[in-house]
Amino acid sequence: MSTDLKRRSIPFSPPDMTEAEANEVRDAIVSGWITTGPRTKKLESIISEYVHTEKAICLNSATAAMEMVLHVLGVGPGDEVIIPAYTYTASASVVQHIGATIVMVDSQKGNVEMDYEQLLKVITERTKVIVPVDLAGICADVDKIKEIVTRPEILAKFRPANDIQKLMGRIIVSSDCAHSFGAVRHGKMAGEIADFSSFSFHAVKNFTTAEGGAMTWNLPFGNEKVERQQVYYGSPVPFIEGETWNEFIYRISQLFSLHGQNKDALAKTKLGAWEYDIIGPWYKCNMTDIMAAIGLVQFERYSEMLKKREGYVAIYNKAIDALNTCLDTEYQVAYLDHKSDNHCSSHHLYLVRLQGRTRKEANKVIENMAERGIATNVHYKPLPMMTAYKALGFDIANYPNAYHLFENEITLPLNTCMTMEDVEYVIENFIEIVKSL
């Protein structure tokens, strides 16, 4: 029994780094390219090929990617963006950044996905984007959301604000894929399922570039030519004859990520090519080659890292199934479905709910686990409980299902730095503590 072993120290989510990542970063540093350069471009190509999209753009965070989607779509003041209440702040804060209105939807009862009946009720003529969240690495049901936004009564409400919205002809689905790089649903990769997708490569994610993220898109008109000049925030973007929409979205995203400057550092290295223009007074959120260097090596290791996570989840599931046979039904431990015939998650987080228990009791389990050297977490405290969103008028009383998901949730450590003995130590201690409640 691993509980009989010497007390262990199990961190929640340390980055899985090797000498290979360190060597690639060193090579990037001595190459002279430490900002956006060839390694970033290579990583973008690898990501787009992996998720089956025409293009990808690497940025400094998933937050930047989610905000980039809204900028590309021309969303702003007067528009509404629908998000779930049960998510991290980044899903919502980007809406506030661009001056649009946040509309929150409760979760389904006992399910981390948004309530689709409530979603239907909150769609208005001002709704431009819906943001499903791939919580714990499990792809949200984007097909269901697309079915909703293509209903005749919903299509009749849609009021497009720029050419991309007009070509879509409906509310756009922009997935928060911060947790789901490598996940699959119905044979499609996270990144190609929704119209737009945003990935996080933060240090705590399965695949990391220390900080970082990427935006991908999969649009039915992506390879059609842009027929006229596009204008963003009053700034005309130079028209390029023959450019496709996929190429344009990549180009405008580059402009938004680098102050609106029409040449990056790589382009300006050509002899005599110092001159550049500022197309618009925009933002600064590009990825560096140092960050991309980590990602290039991480990608080489990623399939094995995903297999390891999947194996650990299977061990947790089996142990909790056995635990539940010893517990009254009302107090059984629930966990998420990470794999079935039609989906496989990225196995990013292992969420459990101590059914029938209070937040106070769940916190006691967290404290007892910490006393045994095991770091746990909570995903998530719903946004309407946070000061920033309460100040905007959101009240958790209006999101009872989200609250009930949170009130007894615990996230167990799940990372590829763990050994098999670490995994056994975690689950055996968890079971012992839960039995003692």
Image: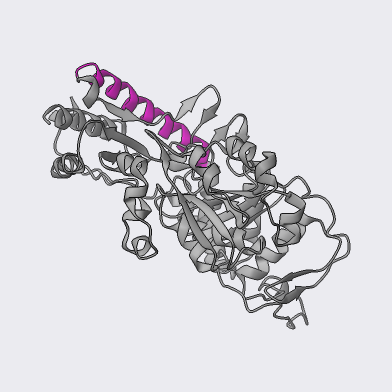
Q: Residue at x 46, y 52 (%)?
A: 104
Nearer the observer, 326 or 272: 326
In this view, the residue farthest toward the top is 325
Tell me: residue 149, above or below residue 233: above
Q: Is residue 129 left or right of residue 338?
A: right
The spot of residue 354 in percent (x, y) is 24, 33
Nearer the observer, 335 or 202: 335
Residue 99 lies in quadrant: bottom right
Task: Judge whether residue 24 can be spotted in this image.
Answer: no
The spot of residue 19 in percent (x, y) is 44, 51
Q: Residue at x 67, y 72 (%)?
A: 264
Q: Is residue 302 left or right of residue 161?
A: left
Nearer the observer, 120 or 290: 120
Quarter of the figure that contains the C terminus: top left
Tell me: residue 98, above or below residue 17: below
Q: Is residue 310 magenta?
A: yes
In this view, the residue farthest toward the right is 241
The spot of residue 397 in percent (x, y) is 32, 49
Q: Is residue 30 magenta?
A: no
Tell me: residue 10, above or below residue 58: above
- Magenta segment, prevailing SS (helix, strand or loop): helix
Q: Which residues are magenta?
A: 301-326
